[in-house]
Image (spheres, rainbow, N blue to C red):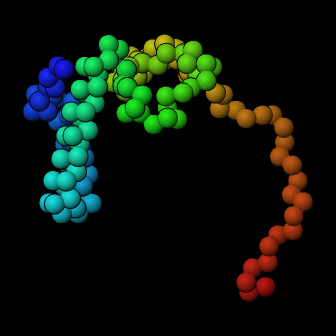
């Protein structure tokens, strides 16, 4: 069994745990809740890294993912999505929207028809 990298060396873990702790502090969580959350996050992270090292693919193992995300119809699997949110932001900021899979242009104009006439009576006001 390969050794699991320490969480102290992983920038991804530190960024995630910082966001979680900041959110908990903003919500007024006490120190015990924060400590327990950090402990559980550390355990989860180490288990995930260990399972990634055991499997040759870089995809998370199916036992760590909810069942609804592991089985997708073939119609949903045909378009590959960028690997991260940062990749999507990069494509948007550089004006390469056409390279983002699943994005389509939706016109701002709904239709040319005139609005229909109201068929309901106006509700009465409390003082009427």
Pinpoint residue 49: horizontal percent, then vertical percent. 24, 27
Give the tally of numbered discs: 0
Q: Is residue 93 visible?
A: no
Q: Is residue 44 above or below residue 6?
A: below
127 with respect to 1 (left or right): right
Pinpoint residue 104: horizontal percent, then vertical percent. 60, 22
62 with respect to 36 (left or right): right
* Residue at x-position 79% and y-position 78%: 124
Q: Is residue 120 visible?
A: yes
* Residue at x-position 16% and y-position 60%: 32
Pinpoint residue 58: horizontal percent, then vertical percent. 33, 17
* Residue at x-position 15% and y-position 53%: 35
Q: Is residue 101 above or below residue 17?
A: above
In the image as oriented, which residue stretches furthest toward the front? 1
Quarter of the picture holding the N terminus: top left
Q: Is residue 82 above or below residue 44?
A: above
* Residue at x-position 49% and y-position 15%: 80
Write down the quadrant of residue 29 in the picture.
bottom left
Residues 68 and 122: in front is 68
Write down the quadrant of residue 113 in the picture.
top right
Quarter of the picture holding the C terminus: bottom right
Pinpoint residue 5: horizontal percent, then vertical percent. 14, 25
Residues 112 and 65: in front is 65
In the image as oriented, which residue stretches furthest toward the bottom? 127
């Amino acid at each position: 069994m390969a050794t699991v990298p320490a969480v102290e060396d992983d920038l991804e873990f530190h960024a995630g745990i910082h966001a979680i702790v900041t959110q908990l502090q903003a919500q007024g969580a006490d120190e015990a809740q924060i400590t327990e959350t950090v402990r559980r996050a550390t355990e989860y992270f180490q288990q995930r890294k260990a399972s990634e090292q055991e499997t040759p693919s870089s995809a998370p193992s199916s036992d760590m993912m909810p069942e609804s995300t592991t089985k997708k119809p073939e119609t949903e699997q045909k378009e590959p999505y960028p690997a991260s949110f940062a990749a999507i932001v990069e494509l948007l900021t550089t004006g390469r929207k056409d390279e983002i899979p699943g994005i389509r242009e939706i016109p701002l104009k709904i239709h040319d028809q005139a609005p229909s006439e109201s068929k309901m009576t106006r509700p009465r006001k409390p003082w009427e």
